[in-house]
Image (cartoon, grey):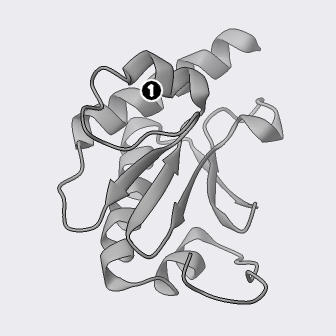
Amino acid sequence: MGKKGVMPTYKTANDYVIEQSEEAQVILKKLIQLIYEAIPEAQELADYKVPSFKLVHAAKKDQQIMMMATKKFVGFYPFPETIEHFKNELGDYKLGKGSIQFPFGQPLPEKLIKKMIKYRHKEIIDTL
């Protein structure tokens, strides 16, 4: 993460974004835009000290998607089931169990990200 010491708590996603590097800001702003384009009713949460979004108002608090800036990439966390469903489309991106790393200086797969957000939204609705 690059910064040392206790991670501050941010009141809004924008508060978090403006504290990050220029490279990270570009990706974070685009991810936030894509979330609202895919799910206009998404609700920003002040949670986990990183930008977090609840896609379904009636969903449990732990069913959110998140993002986090590091020194070299932005991590996007749409949940393990979503990563598994789209792993063949994610190509050379580095994946974790429930995350994707979007390196600085590379274009985002915007259409794919929106598909993933909509997929996660449907997953949550199907569990309610």
* Helix, strand or loop for disc 1: helix
**Of the pair 54 and 108, the residue shown nearer to us:** 108
Q: Is residue 126 left or right of residue 38?
A: right
Residue positioned 33% across, 84% down in the render: 22
Q: Position of residue 88 (x, y in %)?
A: 30, 20
Q: Amino acid under label 1?
A: Lys
Q: Quadrant of the N terminus?
A: bottom right
Q: Quadrant of residue 127?
A: top right
Residue 121 quadrant: top right
* Quadrant holding the C terminus: top right
Between 102 and 50, the residue placed more toward the observer is 102
Q: Which residue is mark 1?
A: 118
* Left or right of 120, for residue 62: right
Query: From the viewer's perspective, is 2 left or right of 113?
Result: right
Residue drawn at the location 58% of the way across and 81% of the way down: 15
Give the percent coordinates (x, y) of residue 44. 63, 56
Residue at the spot 58% in from the left edge and 77% down from the top edge: 16
Crowding near the residue tagged with mark 1, few <14, some 14–19, many ≥20 C-alpha atoms within 10 Å? some
